[in-house]
Image (cartoon, grey):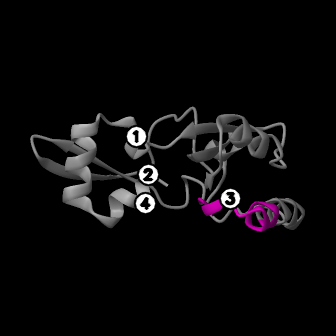
Amino acid sequence: MRFMMIMYPKDYVNAKPGWAPDLKSMEAMGKYNEQLGKAGVLLALDGLTPPATMRARVTFKGGKSKVTDGPFTEAKEVVGGYWIIQVKSREEALEWASRIPGKDTEMVEVRRMFDLTDFDPEVQKEIQKKFGDAAAEMSQ
């Protein structure tokens, strides 16, 4: 099962352009990320710059897209980064999330990613036929 762990740093909303995490926080997070890698569960991870750095939204209507540059009015939650892990169970994903060296101003949401088995057998066949190897990756 693949899970995404999404970091929501509550103080990110007001971070100024050019803000970066302090070295101590980066070292703690680096050790945690290394543990994920050594355990063989890490598929991807990245941190995101604060919204004040550069932000745009793409919306869709009537089959057309529209780009709107920020800043935007008040945001309550802003994603600061993510991890994608592959583990055997929800409990294992929650165990890994519990080990994140988070601060009092941070929250992590854990969400399971779609798996091929989430679709009925006929839809699975169509997905495999249309998407081949990409569909196989989805079911890992």
The earlier-in-sequence mark between 2 and 3 is 3
Q: How far apart are marks 2 and 4 (CA)?
A: 5 Å
The earlier-in-sequence mark between 1 and 2 is 1
**Which structural element holds mark 4?**
helix
**Side (left or right) of 69 relative to 140:** left
Start and end of the magenta stretch? 34-48
Q: Which amino acid does label 3 sit on?
A: Val
Q: Do the residues labelled 1 and 2 touch (CB within 8 Å)?
A: yes
| Crowdedness near tag 3: few (<14), some (14–19) or many (≥20) residues, C-alpha within 10 Å | some
Q: What residue type is labelled 4?
A: Glu
The earlier-in-sequence mark between 1 and 3 is 3
**Side (left or right) of 97 relative to 7:** right
For disc 3, the marked residue is 41
Taking the magenta stretch, the answer to whether it contains residue 6 is no
Q: What residue type is labelled 1?
A: Thr
In the image, 59 versus 93, the foreground residue is 93
For disc 1, the marked residue is 117
**Which structural element holds mark 1?**
helix
Q: Residue 137 carries which label?
A: 4
Taking the magenta stretch, the answer to whether it contains residue 40 is yes
Q: Distance between the residues labelled 4 and 1?
A: 12 Å
Q: Which amino acid does label 2 sit on?
A: Ser
Q: Distance between the residues labelled 2 and 3?
A: 15 Å
Q: Of the residues tagged 2 and 3, which is closer to the observer?
A: 2
For disc 2, the marked residue is 139
Q: Residue 25 at x, y = what percent?
A: 85, 59
| Crowdedness near tag 2: few (<14), some (14–19) or many (≥20) residues, C-alpha within 10 Å | some
Residue drawn at (65%, 65%) of the image: 18
Q: How far apart are marks 1 and 3 (CA)?
A: 20 Å
**Which structural element holds mark 2?**
loop
The earlier-in-sequence mark between 3 and 4 is 3
Q: Do the residues labelled 2 and 4 touch (CB within 8 Å)?
A: yes
